[in-house]
Amino acid sequence: MKHIVSLSGGSASAVTAERVMDKYGKNVVTLWFADTLWEDQDLYRFLEDLEARWEKEIVRYVDGRTPLEVAEDKKLIPNSLAAPCSHELKQKTFLKYIKNQPKPLTVHLGLSWDEEHRMGKPKEIYESVDGVTVDYPLTWKPLPSMAYTNTIAEWGIKPPRLYEMGFPHNNCGGRCVRQGMKEWIRLWKTMPKRFQEVSNWEQLQKEKGGPRATRSILKDRRGGETKAITLEQIKDREDKG
């Protein structure tokens, strides 16, 4: 039996990989990472530190597009309900990769016990390949502490800096198009250049007209009414207090 762990660049998937190698041995485990080319620079340092700890190379895949370039290809402004970047840059490419791997093969994903509602779809996608099963090592007994960054620190590895800045995830450089308003405000306050780049892109897409004219990355649900709100409008609102 071969095993493959999909690494996100975050602490949960790192703990997942450690558990898999502890259980099965690292010689039968492949570590795979999909680079969106939109990552924080410290993510790459973290991956290198993991490779040094495990004495094992991480397979790195690059599609060549960023999440915003994927959205432009699809002629849409992405949001929490429509984010083709995950499918195009991660799921689709990972599926293609595992199809070409020796079978039987177990795919290990870093979802925790409290994310059971998210586990069905990946199983459906990857187990459609003959000889592939999906497992979630963070649900193995005994359950690990969910303070995954503390576990990383105990290894003697500095956790990714986005966690120290308050971000809940270490993907897409703090600008995941699925994240909520709180995290976009955090991005504006901590890395305003990144925020402004996405805000400018959003405005350019709206100016192209069609369905994009009325779409936005975020929604404003204040007052019981849901309506589109741009990143620039959020920044203006925060500036005014």
Image: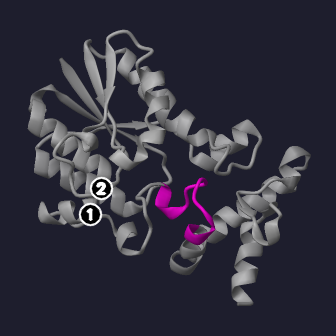
> Does 124 lie within the magenta span?
no
- Please say if 119 is above or below 221: above
| Residue 222 x, y percent position in the rendering | 77, 71
Question: Type of residue at label 2?
Answer: Ser
Residue 111, by quadrant, is top left
Whether residue 157 sits left or right of residue 174 in the image: it is left
Mark 1 belongs to which amino acid? Answer: Thr
Residue 177 lies in the magenta stretch: yes
Question: Residue 65's mark?
Answer: none
Q: Would residue 206 be found to the left or right of residue 180 on screen?
A: right
- Name the residue beneath numbered marker 1: 149
Q: Furthest residue to the top? A: 130
Which residue is nearer to you in this view: 94 or 52?
Answer: 94
Q: Is residue 112 visible?
A: no
Q: Residue at x 25, y 49 (%)?
A: 14
Q: Position of residue 241 (x, y in %)?
A: 70, 90
Query: Element type at marker 1?
Result: helix
- The image shows residue 59, relative to residue 81, as above or below, that is above
Which quadrant is the N terminus positioned in?
top left
Q: Pointer 1: residues within 10 angstroms few (<14), some, or many (20+)? A: many
Q: Quadrant of residue 141?
A: top left
Of marks 2 and 1, which one's residue comes earlier in the chain? Answer: 2
Could you tell me which secondary element the residue under label 2 belongs to?
helix
Q: For mark 2, what is the residue?
A: 11
Give x and y (percent) for residue 40.
Answer: 43, 61
Is 144 situated above or below 59?
below
Magenta span of residues: 172-183
- Picture residue at 77% right of the left edge, 40% below the top: 75
Q: CA distance from mark 2 to mark 1?
A: 6 Å
Residue drawn at (61%, 54%), measured in percent from left and top? 177
Q: Are marks 2 and 1 in contact (CB under 8 Å)?
A: yes
The image shows a total of numbered marks equal to: 2
